[in-house]
Amino acid sequence: MNILILGATGFIGSVVAARLVADGHAVTGLGRNPTRARLKQPAINWRRADLSRITKPEDWDEILKDQHAVVNCAGALQDGLSDDLAATQAEAMLALYTAAKRSRPLIVQISARTAGAAGDLPFLVTKRRADKALAASGLPCLILRPALVLGRNAHGGSSLLRALAALPLALPLVYAESQIETLSVDDVAEAVSRAVAGGLRGDIDLAADEVLTLADLVSLHRQWLGLPPARVFSLAPWLAKPVTWLADIAGLLGWRSPLRSTAMTVMSEGIRSAKGESGIVATSAAAMLSANPSGVQDLWFARLYLLKPLVISGLSAFWLLSGLIPLLALEKTSAHFLPFMPEAAATALTLATCLIDAALGAAVLVRPLARRALLGMLAVSFAYLTGASLLEPTLWLDPLGPLVKVLPSILLTLTALAILDER
């Protein structure tokens, strides 16, 4: 069969795509940036598309041509600079269903439990709207509602579990006693495979036959990472509000933190399902982790995950202050250039370098600009070092180390570039 996968570059979508290729299907993967995915999974026909921009039925005509099934693995947690929930999770899907009525492919929708305290959040409102429209469309379909999905790789909530598990000495948790059901990402791929084969239809919740608390799940991941047991401290929810507020601000700048308010609201009531009969025996968290032993790279990832926002914000503060502080005493700062150029030129050069520093410090906070800002920081840092070494080499011996201090900044910038990718 010819199968189109929406969100094929994501955590769930990439595994589903690999499974369907292994089943012998011709798979087309749709993603916003499939360049790296094309290298990793060359057996898939990759197409670039942004769901938030294909919200009319006619936008789907060419995409759906000759497709026998469509699997929607795309989604977003919260509105932000990089995500539009209404467009991606509702409007694009309704347009897809309308266009699909001409050829009637099977539609598999990877959704979520949309009831409960978090049901009024845009994340679940848009999911519910798409689910209802699909169920009423008359198209052959499966709406699959997995619990918390775990896998060999990690993204979003599963990444946060690993990061919390790697904290030193103790595990401070909010909603430590919240009840959570899990399953393996391979279980989701199995369900999709059965649906494509004609054996699964309807609206199905999928989860392993066990319920863990958040504290249990984090401790299980800590054991998987090979770390000694640590005491769990249950924190009051209000203590997490400053972090959640900062995570929401970061979301507006394009960073998809699992600590945003939507995720915290969902976690406040736990992640439970209303399991029905699907014929699939979902994998427990312990069994999934046991089947995929961790390596040192997993420990590195877990320890770096919560450091990443600190590294980015630290670099931003460093460059912003480097650009703004000299402006408070522009004449004094520009005096360093007077032995080499006229006063007007010295003032202009000082002002230009200050503005460049401040611009880079601001740009690195915006996710779509972050990589270019980090590369700019490296280029400017090497330019400063080269220029200062040629014009005033004695600065290397200055007790305050104005040039020596640039070297740790360069190393921190290289670290940020190394861990910038999200998937």
Image (spheres, rainbow, N blue to C red):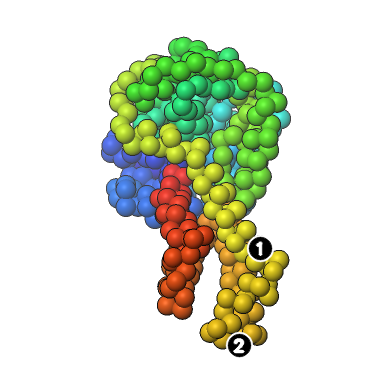
* Residue found at x 61% / y 84%: 345
Q: Quadrant of residue 115?
A: top right
Please state which of residues 157 and 340 is positioned toward the viewer in this rendering: 340
Please state which of residues 3 and 146 is positioned toward the viewer in this rendering: 146
Disc 1 residue type (three-letter): Leu
Are there few (<14), some (14-19), or many (20+) residues within 10 Å of tag 1?
Answer: some
* Residue found at x 52% / y 56%: 370
Q: CA distance from mark 2 to mark 1?
A: 23 Å
* Residue found at x 40% / y 37%: 301
Quadrant in the picture for the C terminus = top left
Disc 2 residue type (three-letter): Pro
Q: Secondary structure at mark 1?
A: helix
Quadrant in the picture for the N terminus = top left
Are there few (<14), some (14-19), or many (20+) residues within 10 Å of tag 2?
Answer: few
Tag nearer the camera, 2 or 1: 2
The answer to whether 241 appears left or right of 203 in the picture is right
* Residue found at x 63% / y 20%: 235
| Residue 275 spot, x, y in % from top left | 52, 15
The residue pinned by badge 2 equals: 342
The answer to whether 297 appears left or right of 175 in the picture is left
Label pair 2/1, CB-CB below 8 angstroms: no
Is residue 61 at least partly visible in the picture?
A: no
Above or below for 87 versus 163: below
The residue pinned by badge 1 equals: 324
Above or below for 61 versus 129: below
Please state which of residues 106 and 27 is positioned toward the viewer in this rendering: 27
Q: Secondary structure at mark 2?
A: loop
The answer to whether 12 appears left or right of 234 in the picture is left
Please state which of residues 391 and 186 is positioned toward the viewer in this rendering: 391
